[in-house]
């Protein structure tokens, strides 16, 4: 049994935690709230923690003498490795939890119960700060409950505090379906939260030498016809404005007051060193950005129009012309070839932060735009962009959610424009491209379009199930009809690896007959899981 958390214990915790994640990797992957076979949270957590362990294998004696303790060095190595290897939203959040622990404990001479509780509270705060729009019922809720229980224990006994944190995390995990309708409909708990529980259990075993006592498992959530509250923005305000800001505390206090009169969903969080993350929903974009200019130096400005569900528009900043490049994440050989033909550097699907950073550096460009093509890769791309900034490379992430949006963005790229203006044009083109995915349901689930059974054909428009059918071609043509009903001049079709022969030709023929003034472009994408991806511009 341990009274303090030393460097050796940190190493054992990392190894034990990775073993636990690997053992439950498939289980966590299966905690998928959507009836599409692409759940990969368990895989992402394993890859993220594997990178942390690889970094921890570095000889501690090779680190500079900066006054930090051996356990502090070990935690810093873990956090750095996790950041560079982070995959998916859960991986990025986990890396921030490790960073919060490392930042607080690095210079603490002895890590006992109260010190660990303080560090866990800071880790929870770092995790929330890493997410622009925190959602309860996720990994964030689980780490917050663990931190609260650790503080409430109010003890120097590291064993008691670790046990309290692990038990509270398990209880919070069981409550996640009550907080997030998507989980309740699918009858599962949050996947990222399950991973954190395994890591806290591993820590308890390292500290106490005993397996943690587990509370009785919560009964499975009963699927119910619940519609999730819209999470992509306010019904009153049309735009989300977000930027980093270099300013002092007094200026930020005035900024908060000013922004509160312009909109809602206001969040301004700082790192303690004069850098702040500003987030607000408004109708007057210019006023929100101008308020930041008055307060200090805003940078990495993004604007999202909710009607387009996510086309961030970096704000204008004067720069001299420099070499540029585009890095695109691609799933499918055909899609990769399309992007390469547009002059982009292609990175395989589900990259780590380090892999994206390597691709950015390999371009040799000083200005790089990254197109992630997957909501789950956006946080990884943002982390890579932050790392690249430290190397003197300016990276703008246009959060494309589908390859068809990336094709639309690359089509308007113009090296004669200023980089900032070019990124704005690409973001607007991506945002103007509505996208749909057609796939087969992998499990029984209750969607907003009704109940879906294994094998049903699902048509998802911008991430939400709109149609459920039995015939693939009929469902594909129906979703194109629905999308063109809102207007459009160009339809792009990307056929998947498992698409039946002639699918694109049949959909093209239908569109040409039903919508004679609409142009149709069809390509072999080769993407898994989705027989057809559709873009409408």
Image (cartoon, rainbow, N blue to C red):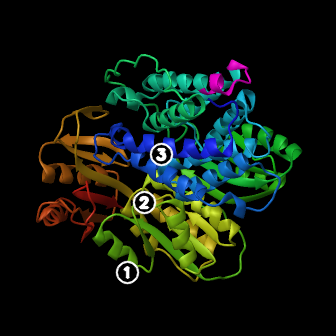
**Residue closest to the eye, 123 or 363:** 123
**On the picture, is 535 further left or further right than 57?**
left
Q: CA distance from mark 1 to mark 2?
A: 17 Å
Picture coordinates of residue 41, whole percent (x, y): 41, 45
| Residue, disc 2 | 373
Q: Nearer the viewer, mark 1 or mark 3?
A: 3
- At 28% from the left and 40% from the top, the residue drawn is 35
Q: Which residues are magenta?
A: 153-162
| Residue, disc 1 | 341
Please name the predominant secondary structure of the magenta segment in the image. helix
Picture coordinates of residue 266, whole percent (x, y): 68, 39
State if disc 3 and disc 2 touch (CB < 8 Å): no
First reached walking from the N terminus: tag 1 or tag 2: 1
Mark 2 element type: loop
Mark 1 element type: helix
Q: Residue furthest right?
A: 250
């Amino acid at each position: 049994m341990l009274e303090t958390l030393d460097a050796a214990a940190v190493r054992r915790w990392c190894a034990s935690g990775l073993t636990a994640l690997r053992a439950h990797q498939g289980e966590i992957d299966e905690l998928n709230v959507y009836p599409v076979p692409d759940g990969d949270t368990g895989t992402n957590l394993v890859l993220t923690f594997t990178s942390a362990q690889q970094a921890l294998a570095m000889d501690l004696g090779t680190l500079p003498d900066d006054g930090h303790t051996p356990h502090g060095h070990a935690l810093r190595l873990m956090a750095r490795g996790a950041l560079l290897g982070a995959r998916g939203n859960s991986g990025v959040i986990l890396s921030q939890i490790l960073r919060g622990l490392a930042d607080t404990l690095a210079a603490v001479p002895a890590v006992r119960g109260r010190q660990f509780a303080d560090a866990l509270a800071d880790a929870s705060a770092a995790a929330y700060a890493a997410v622009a729009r925190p959602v309860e019922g996720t990994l964030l809720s689980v780490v917050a409950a663990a931190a609260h229980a650790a503080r409430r224990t109010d003890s120097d006994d590291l064993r008691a505090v670790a046990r309290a944190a692990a038990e509270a995390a398990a209880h919070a995990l069981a409550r996640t379906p009550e907080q997030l309708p998507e989980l309740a409909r699918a009858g599962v708990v949050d996947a990222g939260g399950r991973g954190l529980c395994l890591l806290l259990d591993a820590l308890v075993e390292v500290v106490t030498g005993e397996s943690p006592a587990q509370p009785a498992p919560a009964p499975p959530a009963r699927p119910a016809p619940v519609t999730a509250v819209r999470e992509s923005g306010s019904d009153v305000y049309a735009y989300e404005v977000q930027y980093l800001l270099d300013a002092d505390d007094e200026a930020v206090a005035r900024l908060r007051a000013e922004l509160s009169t312009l909109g809602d969903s206001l969040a301004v969080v700082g790192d303690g060193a004069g850098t702040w993350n500003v987030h607000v929903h408004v109708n007057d974009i210019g006023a929100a950005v101008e308020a930041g200019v008055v307060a200090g130096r805003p940078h990495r400005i993004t604007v999202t129009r909710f009607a387009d569900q996510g086309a961030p528009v970096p704000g204008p900043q004067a720069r001299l012309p420099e070499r540029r490049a585009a890095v695109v994440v691609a799933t499918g050989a055909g899609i990769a070839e399309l992007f390469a033909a547009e002059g982009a550097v292609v990175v395989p699907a589900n990259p780590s932060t380090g892999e994206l950073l390597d691709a950015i550096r390999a371009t040799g460009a000083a200005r790089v735009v990254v197109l992630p093509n997957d909501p789950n890769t956006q946080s990884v791309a943002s982390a890579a962009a932050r790392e690249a900034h430290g190397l003197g490379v300016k990276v703008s992430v246009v959060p494309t959610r589908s390859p068809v949006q990336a094709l639309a963005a690359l089509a308007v790229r113009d090296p004669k424009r200023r980089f900032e203006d070019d990124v704005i044009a690409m973001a607007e083109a991506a945002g103007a491209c509505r996208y749909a995915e057609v796939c087969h349901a992998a499990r029984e689930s209750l969607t907003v379009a009704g109940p879906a059974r294994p094998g049903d054909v699902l048509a998802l428009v911008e991430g939400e199930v709109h149609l459920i059918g039995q015939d693939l071609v009929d469902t594909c043509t129906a979703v194109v009809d629905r999308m063109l009903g809102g207007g459009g001049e160009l339809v792009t079709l990307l056929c998947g690896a498992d698409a039946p022969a002639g699918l694109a030709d049949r959909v093209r023929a239908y569109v040409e007959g039903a919508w004679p003034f609409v142009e149709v472009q069809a390509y072999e994408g080769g993407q898994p899981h989705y027989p057809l991806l559709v873009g409408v511009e």
